[in-house]
Structure formats: structure tokens, C-alpha cells
Image (spheres, coloured by chain):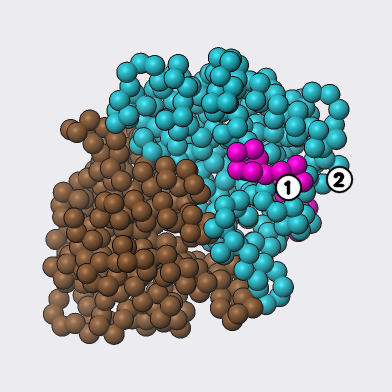
Chain colours: A brown, B cyan
Amino acid sequence: MMHFVDRVLEEIRRKGAPVCVGIDPVYDRLPEAVKSQPYDEDDAAACVDAIFQWTMGLLEAVAEHVPLVKFQSACFERYGWDGVEAYYSLIREAKEMGLVVIGDAKRGDIGTSAEHYAAGCLLDLPGAEDEQVAGPDSITVISYFGLDGLKPFTEAGAASGRGVFALVRTSNPGGDAIQSLKLTDGRSVAEAVAEMVAKIGGDAKYVGKSGYSLLGAVVGATKPEDARRLRTLMPQQMFLVPGYGAQGGSADDVRACFKDDGTGAIITASRSVIFAHEKNTSDDWETAVEKAAVQLRREIREILGASGN
Amino acid sequence: MMHFVDRVLEEIRRKGAPVCVGIDPVYDRLPEAVKSQPYDEDDAAACVDAIFQWTMGLLEAVAEHVPLVKFQSACFERYGWDGVEAYYSLIREAKEMGLVVIGDAKRGDIGTSAEHYAAGCLLDLPGAEDEQVAGPDSITVISYFGLDGLKPFTEAGAASGRGVFALVRTSNPGGDAIQSLKLTDGRSVAEAVAEMVAKIGGDAKYVGKSGYSLLGAVVGATKPEDARRLRTLMPQQMFLVPGYGAQGGSADDVRACFKDDGTGAIITASRSVIFAHEKNTSDDWETAVEKAAVQLRREIREILGASGN
């Protein structure tokens, strides 16, 4: 059983850049070609069908070019259990295409409830052998509960070769209200969370051949100085960096999340890739998405100083 | 449309105590009578069937005695979309029995994703009129994202007469690692979160006739001095207090969560009520649960100095 990060690094090498496409389906923004049937927005089943077909096309357009995809659970959950079924089915499809899958579910609780979330949102779901449902290769989780909130997830990850990304720093403006507060010891709240994550994730049983832990960190790409500080505090954490492209992360912001050797972060772009048809109206939507994924890979390679496309 | 807290207070008066039964089904701990068929633990559908039947019996046993129930989403999600369907079906049943329902989903994200969670986890799900799926009357949410993480939920609550409980202080030992850290201004992190919640929830459009906001707070019943401080910092917040009974919250811990007028908190007990059959083996399990719910109500009334049963 391969360690999660070792596998991620291998896939990054194979595809050529540490990039991830975020799959955040918003029905209103789907291409007209997908919505062309007379769908009723209040008809959840029809919305889920359209989202399923669109995501399949999206996965086929990007699978060759990027190592990872991240599914935004909220966009599926809004349609109830039909949406949740689509979420798991699409995760299976993505895994079969060789993509490493992150379930962006931001789950968290304590004790038994955290164990249930780990079992339900990270691992394969129970079922007869031929009915087993594949869980994602990793998920995002909440850090506010501390060790006993994180451990059920990291233990499940260690037992199954999967990964966990703990929320450390978010990229939204409101995040500062709590995350930037200064502690008496000079650290910010986010830095205290970072040190806790580094300590929990540093347990030898969680660390792969690469030196990275299966417990990574979500670090919003907003301020380069913040990212550099967090990079130092979490040397064994792979960063999952949302906010590139549509949310305004720049080249400097991105570079600060990596180590000097060019490893240590996965850069995620969502809207700029998945809704590329909104700006590129000369191609069909699948081609627009594929070109945007190739461009994302090129941009990140350039930022990292790698040559070629 | 009645304000969420006004309705909660009315139901508390009607049932006689501010108590809530937490529904955290753990298959292994269900009464043998429910598991008596030769269920296979790896057969998710059979587990979900057993949990559904058990929860129905539980709701019938407690509905007459308590104003609120809280569904632990994790325990249903672990069985994938079948579990999610059962969760929503049981919420509908509970509402039809006149119970106020809290969905303990601890959701949170930013921007569009938070809006999707609010739509999917708090509101009624889309569907043709006769297929509409009832969402819970309120949910628990994460505070770490700040204002733009909370607002999509409070706005949805204001538009639909529902409530939101933001995580402020958790009752687990590990929670201290972040929540008790001291800021340079003398506050703890949890107190800073409390003040943010008080400010966001204090918007006049969120406040009901009772003076309470639809944005409440989850406050673990661990230390009375912490609870008293948080009570002062959040005068308009209804506290949702887990951890009574099995998790070890005492009478003093509980009393500290209330105002002098005996309002301001909802005390939740889960395992001590729902698994009452483990200790009370002389009654059938439904009677054991009913007696435990009546005892919970009596204990909280005694703590609050109310007379009678």
C-alpha cells in the first residue's frame, strides 16, 4: 500500500505540474449544451443528471493533463442523497481515470462522530464486495477540535493509504477575523493551528518515503509572507492551495507555498478552468476546459521555473 | 413565519424543560431487539434499515417529553446516500411529531460553497411540490471562516424561520489546544469567536421577539467559569450544550450556561438517553429510553429550580 503523498508526488511527476482542478458545479453556470434539455431548476433529479454528465465530460477533458481533482461536496449535497450518490459515483470514475481525488468535505467533530465521518467520507463505504463504494483518496477536515478531532481521520488515512488536509488558513476576507488574531506568544491563531498540525502529522507512522506526512494543510493563497511563515512551520505538510485564478492568487502567492526544491504544494483552480466556456466562446466547452487545464499546468510550471509545457 | 428561537422557547414551555435528545446511532450499540434479524454489519442497507426503525421508536418514545432532537449527521453519512436519505426522512418524521429538529452537521465553507451547504443542509431540498424534502429547523456550523463563512447560513435562516448554531467551544479534551489559547488582548480564542458570533448574530434582522438571535452558539459543558464568561459575551445567543450525562457535564456546568431567568440554553444528552437499554435491562428498550428522557427533563428542571416533573 503506497503512502498518499508518495503517490501524489509520483502523479505530479507523471503529469508535469502540482495542479488540481476543483470541481464545484453550480447549475446556473453550466454550459448551455449541458442544460439544453428543458430542465427545471426545482427538479433536483434533472439538475443532478446534468451535473453528472457535465462532470464526466470535465474529467475526460482534464484527466490527461492534471494529477489531481478536488470535488466540492457542498455542490452535490445541496441536492440531497441523489447529489451524494452522484458525488461518490463521480469519485469512482475519476479514480478509474487515474486521477488522485480529494473530497473537499471540510468535515470535523469529536470522538465517535469524527470516526463516523472518517468512515463515511474518507474510506470506502460498506457494502457487498461488488457494491462497495469508493471513497476519495483524501479529504479536507476542520482543525478547531484539536487532536481528538483530527486523529480519527489520520488513523483512517494511515490504515488505508489515504490523506487528510487540515484547514489552517482560508483565503476569504472574513478568515482574518479569527485566523490572524495575535496570541500572547507572538503567533497568530493560524500559526498555532499550523504547529498543532505539524506536530500531529509528524508522527512517524504518518510520514512517507518522501518525508511528507499524510496529514497536509489547506493554506489559502492570499499573502506570500503568511504562506512563507506557514511553509516553515509545517515542513512535512503538503499544502493544498485553493484560490488560484478566479479567487485572485498571484504567482508570488503561489511560489511562497513551495519549498526550494519545487515540492510541497498542490495548486487548485476551480472556476477559471471548469467554467472556461464563459470566456472562451469560440471552442466547444470541453475544448475550452481542456485548454484552460493545459494553461493552468503551464502557468504553474513557469512559476516553479520548470521548462516546457 | 415564526422566529426560530421564539418557536424553541414556546416548545420548551410546552414540554417543561430546555432539553434535547441527541440521536447518534451507532449500530453496535442498538438494542438486540432491533438487530435481531441476522444483519450483516458490512451490509449498509440492512444497517440503515435497522437504524431507521430504531430512530422511529426512539422519536415516538421521547416526542411527548422533550422539545428538541438533534440528529448527528456523521452517523448517517457513514452509510453513504442511503444513510443521507434516512437522515432526511427521519427529520421529516420528527417534525411531524412536533419536535424541533437540529441537524448536527457542523458544516462550513466560504462563498458559493457555504451557500450550497446552507441550501442543502438547512433548507428544504428542491423537488416537485409533493417530493420536497424537509430540511432540519436548524444546523450546527463552523466559525473558523469568519463572517463570510457564517452569513450564507444566517441569511438562509432569516429567510426561512430557521436557526444556526455556530461552534464556539467544544467539550473534548483536545479542544483546548486551540480554543483556550490566550490572545494579546487577554481574550481566549473561544472568547474571540464568541464576540464575533455575538456581533454577527446581533443584526436586528436576526433577532426575534424574545431578544435572542437565530444565530446561537455550541458551547460544550466542561468548565462553569468558561460557560459563565461566554454567557456574558453572547447575551443574544441561545446556547446548544452537548456533553450532559455521558460526556460528564455536571449540574454546575449546566447552570452556568443559563441566564438568571432560566432561559438561554438547550441541554443535549445523547448516549445516556438513547442507549438507556444498556443500563436499564428490566424494561423493553423503548420504555428505557422514555424513562431516561423523563429523567433528563426532571434533572434539568431541578438544576433550574423549577418544581414538578
Q: Residue at x 47, y 43 (%)?
A: A112
* Residue at mark 1: chain: B
Q: Is residue A48 magenta?
A: no
Residue at 31% over, 62% down: A205
Residue A70 appears in view: no
Q: Which residue is pictured at 52% across the width and 72% down the height?
A: A192
Q: Main secondary structure of the magenta part?
A: loop
Q: Is residue A95 above or below residue A292?
A: above
- Residue B92, position as x, y percentages in the image: 53, 26
Q: Residues within 10 Å of mark 1 (few under 14, many from 20)?
A: many
In the displayed structure image, the side of residue A81 where residue A66 appears, left or right: left
**Which element type, helix, strand or loop, lies under badge 2?**
loop
The stretch of residues the image draws in magenta is B233-252
Which of the two residues, B40 or A5, is positioned nearer the viewer here? B40
User: At x 25% / y 66%, what residue is drawn?
Assistant: A208
Q: Is residue B243 magenta?
A: yes
Q: Which residue is mark 1?
A: B253
Residue A25, above or below A229? above
| Callout 1: SS | helix
Residue at the disc numbered 2: B260
Question: In front of the other: label 2 or label 1?
Answer: 1
Amino acid bearing label 2: Asp
Please state the chain letter of the residue tagged with numbered disc 2 in the rendered image.
Answer: B
| Residue type, mark 1 in image | Asp
Looking at the image, can residue B172 be seen? yes
